[in-house]
C-alpha cells in the first residue's frame, strides 16, 4: 500500500483554486453544514481541499484502486475538530450515473454542490495496467475503469464491432474521415491477426498517420475506445441529470472536462436548464487553467470548467 500511496504525489488535481472559488469555499472557512458530492473523487485531490476546510464530502468513484488511495489521503486531511464525534467524508464505490441511489442515505444532508472532474488521473494512466496510455505498448487493450464489474474490454470492441460501429466510436472525438479510415484498417488487420495490445493498435495508427500528429491521433483514438468501454457519454448525461435533481436550491454543479465532446454535453445540459428557468449558468464561456498551472502541470492544459447554480 505504501508504494501505491506514494504514487498519489505525482497526480496533481487541476484548477483547485478555481473549484474552491466556484463553491465559494474560502481558506479556513470551516463550513460544517456544507456537503459536497465529489462524483469522481479519484485520488482525493479536490476532496482533500474540501475536508481541510470543514466541508463534508461524499466521494464517488468507479475505480476501486483509486478509492483505496483516496481513503488514506482523506484520513490525513480530516481536521481534528471534525474527526471527534463524526466523519468528514464518506467514500462510495460506483459510477456517477447511479448517483441518486448511491447517496440516498444522505437525503436531507443539505447537498450544496456536485463536482465532476472528468479527466483520468495520472495514477491511472501511468500505474494501472489497463492500456489507458499510448506510452504502455505492451499492455492489453482493456480500458475498464472497474474491471471487477465490467465484462467488455476495448480489445473486444476492436474484435467484434463492424465498420459502421467502429466509425461511430472513433468519430466521437476524431474527424469522421479519419475515423472511417481507422475503422477500415482495423477490419482489414483483424482478419489477419488479433489486435489485443496497445502496441498492436498503435501499429495500425502508424500506418495511417505518418506525420508528427500521430501521437495526438493515438491519444484521441485510445480516448474514444475508453469512452466506449465505460459508456462515458451516456453516464455523464445521466449523472448530470440526477445530480441536478438532488441538488438543493442555490447549490452548484461544477464540471471539469478535458475534450470537446464532454464539454459539449455539459454546455448543452447547462443551457437547457437555464432555458427552462431552473438554473443560472455562471460560466457562459469555459473557465481555463492559469498559465502558471499549465506550466507546472502540462496535463491541465486541456481542462475546461463550467458552473451552474440551481434556482
Image (spheres, helix red, strand yellow):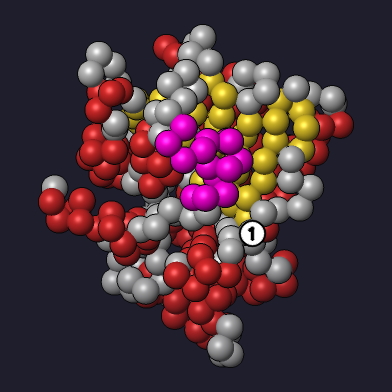
Q: Nearer the viewer, residue 288 or 197?
A: 288
**251 left or right of 8 in image:** right
Q: Nearer the viewer, residue 53 or 131?
A: 53
Q: Which residues are magenta?
A: 16-29
| 67 in magenta | no
Q: Where does the image place residue 25, in percent across and percent down from the top left? A: 52, 36
Q: Nearer the viewer, residue 233 or 276?
A: 276
Element marked by disc 1: loop
Q: Which residue is mark 1?
A: 288
**123 left or right of 250 in image:** left
Please identify the residue farthest to the left as the structure is shown: 2
Q: Is residue 192 above or below residue 153?
A: below
Q: Is residue 142 above or below residue 311?
A: below
Q: Where does the image place residue 220, in percent across and percent down from the top left? A: 56, 67
Q: Quadrant of residue 239?
A: top right
The residue located at (33%, 25%) in the rendering is: 88
Q: Quadrant of residue 122?
A: bottom left
Q: Quadrant of residue 60?
A: top left
Q: Is residue 59 visible?
A: no
Amino acid at each position: 500500500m505504501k508504494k501505491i500511496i506514494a504514487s498519489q504525489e505525482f497526480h496533481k488535481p487541476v484548477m483547485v483554486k478555481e473549484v474552491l472559488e466556484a463553491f465559494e469555499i474560502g481558506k479556513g472557512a470551516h463550513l460544517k453544514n456544507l456537503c459536497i458530492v465529489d462524483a469522481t473523487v479519484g485520488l482525493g485531490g479536490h476532496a482533500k481541499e474540501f475536508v481541510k476546510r470543514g466541508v463534508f464530502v461524499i466521494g464517488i468513484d468507479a475505480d476501486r484502486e483509486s478509492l483505496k488511495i483516496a481513503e488514506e489521503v482523506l484520513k490525513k486531511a480530516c481536521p481534528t475538530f471534525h474527526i471527534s464525534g463524526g466523519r468528514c467524508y464518506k467514500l462510495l464505490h460506483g459510477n456517477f450515473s447511479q448517483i441518486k441511489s448511491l447517496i440516498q442515505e444522505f437525503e436531507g444532508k443539505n447537498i450544496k454542490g456536485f463536482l465532476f472532474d472528468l479527466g483520468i488521473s495520472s495514477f491511472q494512466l501511468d500505474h494501472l495496467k489497463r492500456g489507458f496510455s499510448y506510452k504502455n505498448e505492451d499492455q492489453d487493450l482493456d480500458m475498464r475503469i472497474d474491471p471487477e464489474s465490467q465484462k467488455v474490454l476495448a480489445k473486444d470492441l476492436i474484435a467484434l464491432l463492424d465498420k459502421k460501429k467502429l466509425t461511430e466510436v472513433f468519430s466521437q472525438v476524431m474527424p469522421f474521415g479519419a475515423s472511417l479510415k481507422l475503422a477500415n484498417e482495423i477490419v482489414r488487420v483483424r482478419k489477419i491477426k488479433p489486435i489485443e495490445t496497445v502496441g498492436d493498435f498503435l501499429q495500425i495508427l502508424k500506418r495511417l498517420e505518418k506525420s508528427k500528429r500521430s501521437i495526438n491521433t493515438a491519444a484521441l483514438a485510445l480516448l474514444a475506445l475508453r469512452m466506449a468501454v465505460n459508456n462515458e457519454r451516456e453516464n455523464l448525461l445521466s449523472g448530470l441529470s440526477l445530480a441536478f435533481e438532488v441538488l438543493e436550491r442555490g447549490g452548484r454543479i461544477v464540471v471539469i472536462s478535458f475534450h470537446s465532446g464532454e464539454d459539449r454535453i455539459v454546455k448543452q445540459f447547462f443551457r437547457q436548464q437555464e432555458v427552462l428557468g431552473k438554473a443560472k449558468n455562471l460560466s457562459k464561456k469555459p473557465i481555463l487553467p492559469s498559465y502558471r498551472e499549465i506550466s507546472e502541470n502540462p496535463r491541465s492544459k486541456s481542462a475546461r470548467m463550467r458552473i451552474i447554480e440551481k434556482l
